Amino acid sequence: MNDAPVRTEQDGAFNCIALMDAASCFIFDMVMVPTGKPEPTKLEVRRLLKKGWGAKRQYPNTLFVPAGRFQSVLPTEAERQGITVVPVHESQLLVFMKNFDEAEKILNEALIIQKKINGEEHRSVTNIYEKLGEINLEKGNFIKAETLFNKALNINYKILGEKHFAYASDLISLSKVKAEMKDYNAAIELCNRGIETAISVGGKESSFLTGTYSILAKIYKDKGDYATSDSLYRISIRMYDKIYGRNYIRTALTMTNFGSLLLQMDSVKQAYNYANEGLKILKSDKEFDPINIARAEGVVGEILTSMKSYEQAEKLLLNSYNNLKKVPGNNKPEKESLNRLIKLYKAWGKDGELKKYQLALVSL
């Protein structure tokens, strides 16, 4: 569940492993596993599966697990219960998730059950509010998303207090909603509150902050304050490098996003260097995530268009488009990739291809 290992002073670093229903994103249970261990223990796996059975009163036919992980204890225990284990890349799980409306319906049903079991003020309830908020943010229902994140924030404040990463995370989620609503000042204020909260909990070098600075950088970029965005992206990349190293996926993604900013600032050569390095890291990753790669290819392709390297740009942008149009429930990435192709063919003077992708954009 964590983008980066959860670090504690006393016990070291952990990964948070969860058992989740793919259709609704409802989390049955989770376990903290030390980063030095490849998977949960036999007892922990049995507990996870039992929690899943308790919610559905049956075991699933199929359990999708990340390729290259959980290759011993988890498959053995799952197959003992008649469950077929299928290794897939995490990004491919999007294919198995149903539409947002059905997911929202299932989560609302789960919310009623959790409230009856645990009451209104419980982390199981805030988890569902947060997931519902994410779904509505993706759907573009920003007012509803804001309401849901605020509910989670208020409950977390009551049960956990202000000095908790969950409270900080809700503030960051609200900042993303405000940014989508183009209320950039409110988004910046909320994101800074989230950063202050995270620092009060985990200090200035907390791993929580690495991605948060990147989120704040994007908000400043969208606002048009490129200088501040530049500084924040550099802070985020520096922290990622220090904590996880240059070859970490999130470092690579932040580098490609920084490349996109640098293109806006007309620092084309520097933009290409950052974005292309990020793309190379993503392609060299053993898990090889096609969706993240497609996003990075879009950025590098756009930069190559500005450099008039049209053939190289076309190859990357077509690959980006063909992968991003497969992302279910949200056509924003597809629109972005189409706009990049339109920009390419307009600059290149290929009218036939230009009209083809203009029509594709209109039809969305």
Image (cartoon, helix red, strand yellow):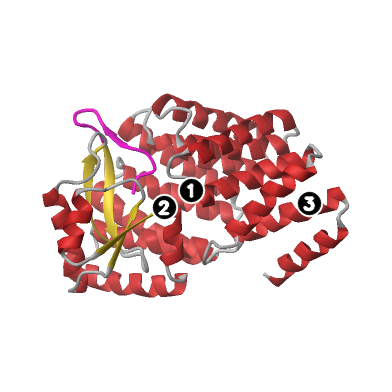
The kind of residue on which mark 3 rests is: Lys
Judge by depth and name the residue closer to the eye, 7 or 92: 92
Numbered disc 1: secondary structure: loop
**Mark 2 surroundings: few (<14), some (14-19) or many (≥20) residues within 10 A:** some
- Residue depicted at 14% across the width and 56% down the height: 46
Query: What predominant SS class does the magenta segment belong to?
Result: loop
The kind of residue on which mark 1 rests is: Asp
- Asked if the residue under mark 3 is in contact with the one under mark 2, i.e. CB atoms within 8 Å, the reply is no
**Could you tell me how far apart the alpha carbons at marks 1 and 3 are, in whole angstroms?**
26 Å
* Residue 222 seen in this snapshot: no
First along the sequence among labels 2 and 1: 2
Which mark lies nearer to you, 2 or 3? 2
The residue at which mark 1 appears reads as 289
- Residue depicted at 70% across the width and 58% down the height: 338
- Residue 179 image label: none
- Residue 89 image label: 2
The residue at which mark 3 appears reads as 343
- The percent position of residue 115, horizontal first and vertical second, equals 23, 69
Note whether 10 is above or below 257 in the view shown.
above
- The percent position of residue 34, horizontal first and vertical second, equals 22, 37
* Residue 20 seen in this snapshot: yes
Q: Is residue 78 magenta?
A: no
Left or right: residue 110 versus residue 222 is: left
Judge by depth and name the residue closer to the eye, 313 or 202: 313
- Residue depicted at 37% across the width and 68% down the height: 23
